[in-house]
Image: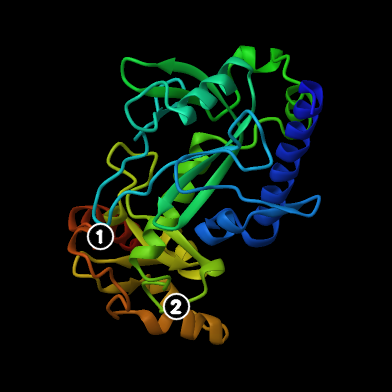
Amino acid sequence: MTESTDRALDTQVRLAAFRFLEERARLYGETLTAETLRQGFEFRGETVKLVGPQGIFKPRILTDYPLSITTVAPKPGQRRPYDDGFQPDGTVIYRYRGTDPRHHDNVRLRRAMQDRVPLIYFHATVPTRYIAAWPVYVIGDDQEHLAFHVDVDGQKPWAEQSDHVAEPELSRRYGVRTTRQRLHQQSFRDRVLRAYRDHCAVCRLRHSDLLDAAHIISDSDPEGEPRVSNGLSLCKLHHAAYDQQLIGIRPDLIVEVRASILEETDGPMLLHGLQEIHESELAVVPRRPEWRPDEHALERRYRKFRELTDSVIEQ
């Protein structure tokens, strides 16, 4: 097989992988399971896996470059803030495999950097769950610290000037597929829902497609860190009600409903969805103490709820 043929096949496999991930996200949402990545997709009668036992992965069908790089999820109870591995310029620090810069996986990833080959980045949110960013590019090699620098936003100027055969088509068809913000938001959601065992904390609804990770203190606030203890797993109804200050949650985990809502007369959704939860205790809380809602955050948020409720009464 000639070099030009190898490059053409490489391009086709990467495009097929990107299409597969795009379709999975459209049908099933952003989160991918480890099983899905291991099973991969069919290409010309051959199964192409997306990940392997190690973080830097080249499927058998490719000859030169890795297809993907994968992070490891934090251990239960371990705190991982938004910027873990991320640099101020939007790049990700990706550690070498082992400590030998000449290890074949490190050499392949370095070659992908030199030839400006687009890759897939799988970001572990919780054990066995991932979100994908593509195309991403290795843009730096720090042998002193045994790490590569990876651009996950597609913002580096040279990324538009690649002479790799796949690059023009990939940039044109896929552009910037993702950003740090999307990775962070999905990571926060997966960790919070896992802590609440995929239930709504208020009503016990267990249908992940209808659940959100609600911030107690907004992520735009300096204190609104992406910790599980600053989150609540809420169904769409109770998340909206919490954000609109229709319900409040006290530091002792008791739910209150705004007085004006309690006085309304509507249909069964208002009655059962909101009015009947007044003065009830949260139905589901995390088992691990460090994942339980932070009392200080709840108190601060609850004060705002009371201030708004009291102002409505005065009017």
The residue that appears at 54% across and 61% down in the rendered structure is 35
Location of mark 1 (residue):
291
- Residue 198, image x, y percentages: 43, 70
In the image, residue 285 sits, relative to residue 177, either above or below, namely below
Compare marks 2 and 1 and give the one earlier in the sequence: 2
Disc 2, SS: loop
The residue that appears at 45% across and 22% down in the rendered structure is 149
Name the side, left or right, on which 3 lies relative to 113: right
- Residue 136, image x, y percentages: 59, 30
Task: Give the amino acid type for the residue marked by disc 1 in the picture.
Answer: Trp
Quarter of the picture containing the C terminus is bottom left
Viewer can see residue 312 = no
Disc 2 packing (10 Å; few <14; some 14–19; many ≥20):
many
Quarter of the picture containing the N terminus is top right
Location of mark 2 (residue):
274
Front-lying residue, 309 or 142: 142
Quadrant location of residue 219? top left
Q: Closer to the observer: label 2 or label 1? A: 1
- Residue 86, image x, y percentages: 40, 30
- Residue 209, image x, y percentages: 56, 67
Disc 1, SS: helix
Viewer can see residue 104 = yes
Task: Give the amino acid type for the residue marked by disc 2 in the picture.
Answer: Leu
Disc 1 packing (10 Å; few <14; some 14–19; many ≥20):
many
